[in-house]
Image (cartoon, rainbow, N blue to C red):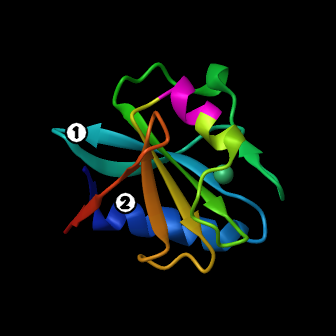
Amino acid sequence: MVRIRLPALQSALLACRNVYPHEFIGLFREKNGVLEELMLAPLAEYGRAHSSFSEIHLPLDPSLVATLHSHPNGVLLPSKQDVRFFSSRGKWHFISGYPYRLQDVACYDNKGKRVMIEVVP
Ligand SMILES: [Zn+2]
């Protein structure tokens, strides 16, 4: 189970809506076991088919344990490419599907196994 603050998740969903129909990608910072805030990846590319960011532009920050990216087609399942990405960094990986409401979010661990999300106020 992964715990995330409501405002952090809401900012991510808003960003997903803002870049639609492109894909959004961002990171979450963890504090005391809760994902507390959204961080935008510097120089991230929000593409139509997929989005990416470059590791070398990321601060060496061990609290960045989670990512979120959007699926403009609304599918909440990770692609093969996603699962490969999940295993490369971080503990938790969110996928939000269009239309990006709170219920349009799934989370996976770094092996691609779906985990429960607890949204905390
Ligand atoms: Zn994806």
Q: Position of residue 78 (x, y in %)?
A: 60, 51
Residue at figure coordinates x 72%, y 59% from the top left: 23
Give the Cα separation between the discs numbered 2 and 1.
12 Å
Q: In the picture provided, is 120 more to the left or to the right than 60? A: left
Under circle 1, the secondary element is strand
Q: Is residue 3 visible?
A: yes
Q: Position of residue 90 (x, y in %)?
A: 44, 31
Segment tinted magenta in the rendering: 84-89
Residue at figure coordinates x 51%, y 24% from the top left: 59
Above or below residue 23? Residue 86 is above
User: To which quarter of the image does residue 73 belong?
Assistant: bottom right
Which residue, as the protein is rendered here, is positioned at the far right?
48
Above or below residue 84? Residue 20 is below
Q: Main secondary structure of the magenta part?
A: helix
Q: In the picture provided, is 118 more to the left or to the right than 70? A: left
Residue at figure coordinates x 64%, y 37% from the top left: 42
Q: Position of residue 8 (x, y in %)?
A: 37, 60
How would you rate the neighbour count of disc 2 (Cα within 10 Å): few for under 14, some for 14-19, many for 20 or more?
some
Please name the residue that numbered disc 1 is placed on. Answer: 31
User: To which quarter of the image does residue 118 belong?
Assistant: bottom left
User: To which quarter of the image does residue 62 belong?
Assistant: top left
Please name the residue that numbered disc 2 is placed on. Answer: 8
Under circle 2, the secondary element is helix
Q: Amino acid at mark 1?
A: Lys
Q: Amino acid at mark 2?
A: Ala
